[in-house]
């Protein structure tokens, strides 16, 4: 009798991971980390700014901006002997101003080194 040759049974896997599948799986695994980094980057800057207690009391005086006043005029008024550019820069830094535009009634902190002596 002759026997018919039977091929050996090779177990096959049901899941075959292709290159595209590996990329998708890697992207899904990395997604939570990307979201966490994005949230930290977006909210991190404001958290640092809000922790600052501000300038200590006694290191500045306050003035109220009148209609038509500018930072240059205020700088010349509070420190007539100092360079107005330096005084304007100190006022902008102390008050964390975005620009040089002021509105009437706005309160500005003036560094104590430039405030007029009584």
Image (tube, rainbow, N blue to C red):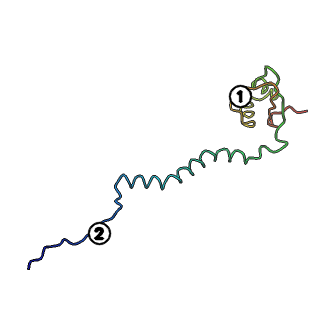
Which of these two is toward me, 15 or 102?
15
Q: In this orientation, which residue lies closer to the viewer: 73 or 41?
A: 41
SS class of the residue under badge 1? helix
Q: Residue at x 61, y 44 (%)?
A: 42
N-terminal label among 1 and 2: 2
| Position of residue 20 in the picture relative to residue 48 (left or right) | left
Q: Quadrant of residue 78?
A: top right
Q: Position of residue 27 (x, y in %)?
A: 45, 52
The x, y position of residue 90, in whole percent, is: 73, 34
- Work out whether 42 lies above or below 14: above
Q: Residue at x 77, y 29 (%)?
A: 82
Residue hosting label 2 = 11
Residue at the far front: name it.
Answer: 1
Q: Is residue 14 above or below residue 116?
A: below
Return the mark for residue 30: none
What quarter of the picture does the C terminus occupy?
top right
Q: Viewer-proximal residue, 5 or 91?
A: 5
Q: Which of the pair 11/27 is nearer the observer?
A: 11
User: Which circle marks residue 85 in the picture?
Assistant: 1
In the rendered image of this protein, does residue 71 appear above or below residue 40?
A: above
Q: Residues within 10 Å of mark 2 (few under 14, many from 20)?
A: few
Q: Residue reaching furthest right? A: 118
User: Marks 1 and 2, Cα distance to the nearest angstrom?
Assistant: 82 Å
Q: Estimate how packed mark 1 is, as few (under 14), some (14 to 19) or many (20 or more) residues with alpha carbons within 10 Å.
A: few
Mark 1 or mark 2: which is in front? Answer: 2
Q: Is residue 95 left or right of residue 117?
A: left
Q: Is residue 51 above or below residue 78?
A: below
Identify the residue at horizontal 34%, vertical 62% (top origin): 14
Work out which residue is located at the far left of the displayed protein and give it. Answer: 1
Placement of the N terminus among the 4 image quadrants: bottom left
Would you identify the image quadrant in which residue 104 lies?
A: top right
């Amino acid at each position: 009798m002759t026997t018919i040759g039977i091929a050996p049974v090779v177990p096959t896997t049901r899941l075959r991971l292709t290159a595209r599948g590996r990329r998708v799986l890697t992207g899904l695994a990395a997604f939570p980390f990307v979201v966490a980094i994005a949230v930290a980057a977006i909210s991190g800057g404001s958290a640092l700014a809000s922790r600052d207690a501000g300038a200590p009391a006694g290191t500045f005086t306050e003035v109220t901006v009148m209609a038509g006043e500018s930072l240059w005029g205020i700088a010349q008024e509070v420190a007539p002997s100092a360079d107005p550019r330096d005084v304007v820069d100190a006022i902008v830094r102390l008050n964390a101003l975005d620009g040089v535009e002021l509105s009437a009634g706005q309160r500005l902190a003036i560094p104590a080194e430039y405030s007029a002596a009584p």
